[in-house]
Image (spheres, grey):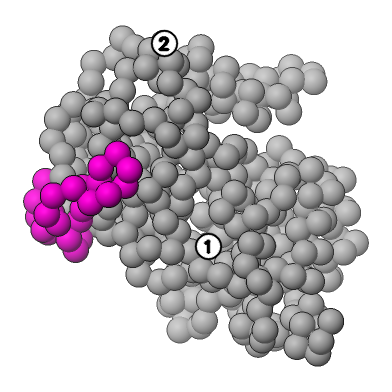
């Protein structure tokens, strides 16, 4: 390794763990304490602790911050640190992901390994030896930065999954199963889809509040003229409205085939598909290949979603308060990230931390 790469390897890395994630055990924390420099490992078990940790990280000026948990943990860590850096006029660190939570759609974008102990250690080793430097775009929704969000059935599904996960955690030996893909499948098949089958459709109006938006065809091609600011993208019945800057929602499911983490506009999917169709076409939906006239795709950099009744929501896989109206924007800054698919950086992006 040359001198420049050696300098990168010696940079201190802040590791922020979600103490509520299923994989964050005493064994993992103890093991990480052996390989992470003293004082650089932070375990947060509440929002208040997380904000305090973010303040210390910004004050010390870490060049790289790793989030250990799911997409929701990554979203909160990035939000706290970006907002504090902006308020204090400081440069952003490079953010990375240790795959420890449920789903982890971002892990498929950034190349993080599996959430087992060996995978976490492998990611830390790769970071010090070969982790590349890249950028992604994120949404600003509900005061948070997030790679994806949803309003409608998506929010219901997250709540049902949490019910299954909490119930499984009370049964010895079932906790890990309930907190993974199997738990989500059980929730979707036994709670969400049967309930939605008999639910009346909500009515929604999606308005373009940003720059010119674009309707997309079944292959992602532009359809029609650009849609100007203030115009309605869609008005009518719907099951859910989904938005994302990344193709993957979780577990490798390519729910947003037209999303690009580097583009200036995010993917908007307006879905009015019934439960039987979801079951019938689940493999195609999972792989991002399913097309249907009731599945509308757009690209936009700012929208307002207006429902005729309060609808459950999720932000980066975390349940959010039901809402009737919300605005979703593309965050103007590119977010620096550790990208294991990218070549390693030639020079350090930031100065080593102080203190």
Q: Residue at x 46, y 47 (%)?
A: 247
Q: Residue at x 23, y 21 (%)?
A: 201
Read off the magenta span. Answer: 210-232
Q: Quadrant of the N terminus?
A: bottom right
Q: Residue at x 76, y 58 (%)?
A: 123
Q: Which mark is residue 287?
A: none
Q: CA distance from mark 2 to mark 1?
A: 36 Å
Figure check: 134 above or below 59: above
Q: Is residue 208 visible?
A: yes
Residue hosting label 1 = 78
Between 106 and 258, which is closer to the camera in this rendering? 258
Q: Is residue 140 visible?
A: no
Residue hosting label 2 = 194
Name the spot of residue 152 as percent of width and height, x first.
33, 31
Q: Residue at x 49, y 40 (%)?
A: 254
Figure check: 355 above or below 47: below
- Image quadrant assignment for residue 35: bottom right
- Image quadrant assignment for residue 325: top left
Q: Are marks 2 and 1 in contact (CB under 8 Å)?
A: no
Q: Quadrant of the C terminus?
A: bottom right
């Amino acid at each position: 390794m040359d001198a420049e790469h050696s300098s990168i390897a010696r940079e201190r890395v802040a590791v922020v763990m979600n103490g509520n994630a299923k994989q964050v055990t005493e064994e993992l924390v103890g093991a990480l304490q052996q390989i992470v420099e003293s004082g650089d490992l932070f375990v947060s078990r509440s929002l208040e602790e997380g904000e305090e940790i973010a303040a210390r990280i910004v004050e010390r000026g870490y060049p790289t911050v790793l989030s250990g948990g799911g997409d929701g943990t990554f979203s909160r860590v990035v939000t706290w640190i970006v907002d504090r850096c902006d308020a204090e006029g400081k440069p952003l660190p490079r953010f990375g992901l240790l795959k420890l939570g449920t789903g982890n759609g971002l892990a498929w974008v950034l190349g993080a390994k599996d959430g087992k102990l060996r995978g976490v250690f492998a990611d830390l080793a790769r970071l010090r030896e070969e982790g590349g430097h890249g950028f992604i775009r994120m949404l600003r929704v509900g005061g948070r930065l997030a790679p994806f969000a949803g309003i409608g059935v998506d929010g219901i599904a997250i709540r049902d999954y949490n019910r299954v996960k909490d119930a499984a955690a009370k049964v010895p030996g079932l906790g890990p199963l309930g907190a993974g893909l199997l738990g989500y499948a059980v929730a979707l098949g036994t709670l969400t889809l049967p309930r939605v089958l008999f639910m009346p459709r909500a009515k929604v109006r999606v308005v373009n509040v940003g720059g010119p938006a674009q309707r997309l065809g079944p292959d992602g091609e532009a359809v029609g003229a650009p849609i100007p600011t203030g115009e309605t993208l869609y008005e009518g019945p719907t099951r859910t409205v989904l938005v994302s800057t990344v193709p993957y929602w979780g577990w490798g499911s390519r729910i947003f085939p037209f999303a690009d983490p580097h583009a200036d506009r995010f993917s908007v999917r307006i879905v009015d598909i019934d439960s039987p169709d979801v079951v019938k076409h689940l493999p195609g939906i999972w792989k991002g290949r399913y097309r249907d006239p009731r599945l509308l795709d757009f690209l936009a950099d700012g929208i307002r979603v207006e429902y005729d009744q309060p609808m459950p929501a999720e932000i980066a896989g975390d349940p959010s308060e039901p809402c009737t109206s919300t605005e979703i924007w593309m965050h103007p800054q590119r977010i620096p990230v550790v990208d294991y698919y990218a070549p390693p950086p030639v020079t350090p992006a930031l100065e080593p931390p102080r203190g």
